[in-house]
């Protein structure tokens, strides 16, 4: 692939939750498409992914629920790579439970990571993206942000919120040439599912019309598209990749 055909050539991206799974694969694909990437996570494995990607990547340990740390990430990104063109709000937590079994602590954890982190990230990059002449924010929501599911009141609530926040930010930031779009995956084969009941996951997978669990590549290609200039006329849009689960 020549430099002229790389979809993200010359762009600088911040990807949260990038130590493993979907976030790590997004970082790998971004670098392959010509981007410089700052990977952030509370998990130390992000350092190994960044090392694998070489000079085009940098890892910062980062708690998305702390606003000051977002500001530090943006400043470090500009210092290392010169600007910020793309933010992927990828960090998330998924702890399904019935309403009666959902604790205040669990509900708050979902809110702080899945929703408040997206707000902090969006707010933090506005100045740097404006200075760069615009940018693209890609929010990872969920199929659970499109319809109701049992045992997901905390998780789905935050993902519906991310869907709405995306549209509000898209309207507010359009005049700055900052685009904001959301991606809504269904069940994706990532380490996030490792601790969940295999029987429940199998039943959920069997309910997917296409008959399979998504792979990270199914989501990553959409994220690359939204981050690139190929989607330059898209903002406030939501792309669902759930194998038909929401039909």
Image: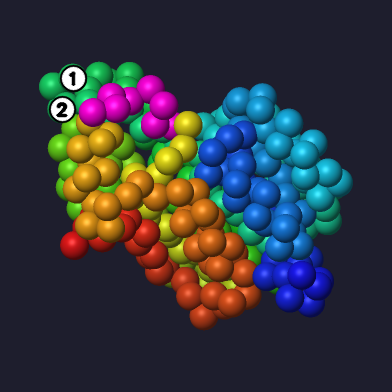
Compared across the picture, whether 218 is left or right of 137 comes to left
Q: Is residue 106 above or below residue 172?
A: above
Residue hosting label 1: 101
Real-space Cα separation, disc 1 to disc 2, in angstroms: 5 Å
Q: Position of residue 125 (x, y in %)?
A: 63, 53
Determine if the magenta segment contains residue 194: yes
* Front in this rendered view, residue 158 or 126: 158
- Which span of residues is magenta-colored? 192-199
Determine if the magenta segment contains residue 98: no
Residue 116: quadrant of the picture:
top left
Q: Position of residue 194 (x, y in %)?
A: 41, 26
Residue hosting label 2: 99
Q: Is residue 236 at least partly visible in the picture?
A: yes
Q: Please state the total of marks drawn on the protein image.
A: 2
Residue plotted at (32% across, 50% down) = 212
Q: Is residue 131 at least partly visible in the picture?
A: no
Compared across the picture, whether 160 is left or right of 194 comes to left
Q: Quadrant of the C terminus?
A: bottom left
Where disc 2 sits, the SS reads loop
Q: Position of residue 52 (x, y in %)?
A: 77, 39
């Amino acid at each position: 692939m020549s430099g002229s055909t790389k979809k993200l050539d010359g762009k600088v991206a911040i990807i949260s939750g990038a130590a493993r799974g979907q976030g790590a694969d997004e970082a790998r694909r971004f670098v392959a498409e010509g981007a410089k990437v700052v990977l952030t996570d509370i998990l130390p494995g992000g350092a190994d992914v960044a090392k694998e990607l070489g000079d085009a990547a940098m890892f910062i340990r980062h708690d998305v629920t702390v606003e000051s740390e977002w500001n530090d990430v943006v400043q470090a990104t500009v210092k290392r790579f010169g600007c910020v063109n793309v933010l992927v709000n990828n960090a998330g937590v998924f702890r399904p439970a019935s309403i009666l079994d959902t604790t205040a602590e669990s509900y708050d954890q979902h809110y702080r990571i899945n929703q408040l982190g997206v707000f902090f990230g969006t707010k933090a990059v506005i100045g740097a993206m404006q200075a760069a002449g615009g940018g693209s924010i890609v929010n990872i929501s969920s199929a659970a942000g499109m319809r109701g599911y049992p045992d997901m009141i905390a998780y789905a609530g935050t993902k519906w919120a991310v869907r709405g926040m995306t549209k509000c930010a898209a309207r507010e930031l359009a005049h700055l040439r900052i685009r904001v779009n959301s991606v809504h995956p269904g069940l994706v084969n990532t380490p996030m599912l490792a601790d969940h009941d295999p029987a429940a996951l199998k039943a959920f997978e069997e309910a997917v019309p296409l008959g399979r669990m998504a792979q990270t590549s199914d989501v990553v290609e959409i994220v690359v598209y939204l981050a690139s200039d190929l989607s330059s006329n898209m903002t406030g849009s939501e792309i669902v990749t759930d194998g038909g689960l929401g039909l």
